[in-house]
Amino acid sequence: MVAFVFLVLAAHGFLADAARVMKKAADLKAMETPPSSMKAVQQSSYFPCRGPTWSCISLKEDAPVPKPGKGQVLVQIKGTSVAPKEVECVEPICLAFPLAGRLVGPSKIPFRCTKKGETLGGTGSGSSELLIDGAGYVAAVGEGCSEFSVGDEVWGFFKGTYAEYALGSCDKVRPKPKSLSFIDAGTIPSSACAANEVFRKAGAPWKLSDNVTVVVTAGQGGTGFIAVQIAKLLGASRVITAASGKGAEMVKSFGVVDEVIDYHKQELFDALGNDTVDVVFDNIAAVGTADKAMHAIRPGGTFVLLTGGGKGQLSKDPKEGVTQIHFGIFAPEGGETLDLFAKGFDEGKLHPHTFDTYGLAEVPQAFTRQMGRGLIGKIAVVPDKKILSGSDHP
């Protein structure tokens, strides 16, 4: 009986492996000559819209496949992500971006409303370009990108990823971590690079002898779950965060967080003593967080506030010796940074967490879920996902 069960399991594993090989072969064959049209989620009306209907966006069945120019690759997208900035580019708030850019500088607000007929998942051009993470197969290579070949598995930053194909600059695309699926890999670069840049502004990388303690105010969301891991990767001796329920279970499973405060039971900074923390990364931006954190930060320490949907501000009465940084929109990184993350994943030092996946036709539902509560990790958009009748989303 045991031998029979073993044979059944072995056969199942063989069939699964064979299916994956056949799927990859089909993908590679399709890339021999990229099609002229593709499915893409586009802005279908001029005025921004709101959930849950998101009436200004729709799935176009015959959008033109872009052609790579000099310094670009065309990638068949197998996974990308949803984050607040993608949602904001179709919401009414995007109408205020140009005004905000004039007030604080275009580099602080480097994007705008998605235009009619434009594919979602990265908008704009030139200095007003917003790129989004993704992963997939290289389908075509433009001039000056000799390091890539058709069929290469890559991840990085692209424009227009809510589609079957998207363009990426060669310096913003790198080989995908071997240990990650396309779906997981497509959710990582933006959040990981944002956390990396925040910590480097706060003095990373650190030596273990520096004995640095880092606090990430929210550890279970799309930025926080990877930020706690990158803090350790960059040399933090001790990492502390707040999470609850299944979010706390996820954070603890990474094996890099030294203390998890249940925010339903205790205020994060009430749990921390005076002068016990070197760096606070406030990725939730709740009102009053900077003031609450000051007692815990050592003189010479840093408080970094991430620009986002929260209304939090820097403290008007910071502790003497504490540096405060208002972190705006990060500049997408490539090359060595993405390779550092890939090495971290392949060595088991970093771990993905995809909360749920949505197909192109389900982007409105994905946006609604992103703006809801109880999100743990990242939401993925998978262009070739087969949509079944009914709902399979939590």
Image: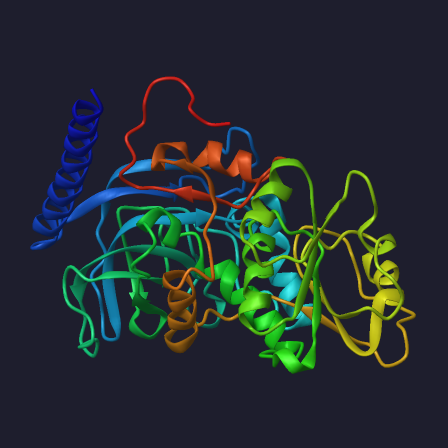
Q: Is residue 232 left or right of residue 383?
A: right
Q: Position of residue 319 (x, y in %)?
A: 90, 74
332 or 48, which is in the foreground?
332
Q: Position of residue 55 (x, y in %)?
A: 48, 32
Q: Residue at x 86, y 71 (%)?
A: 275
In the rendered image of this protein, does residue 120 appear above or below residue 16?
below
- The quadrant the N terminus occupies is top left
What colour scheme has been applied to the protein in the rendered image?
Answer: rainbow
Q: Residue at x 58, y 79 (%)?
A: 205
Q: Residue at x 54, y 57 (%)?
A: 226
Q: Position of residue 149 (x, y in %)?
A: 15, 67
Q: Is residue 255 left or right of residue 317?
A: left
Q: Residue at x 39, y 64 (%)?
A: 347
Number of numbered discs on residues:
0
14 or 199, which is in the foreground?
14
Q: Quadrant of residue 296?
A: bottom right
Q: Is residue 26 left or right of residue 322?
A: left
Q: Quadrant of residue 280?
A: bottom right
Q: Judge whether residue 120 can be spotted in this image.
A: no
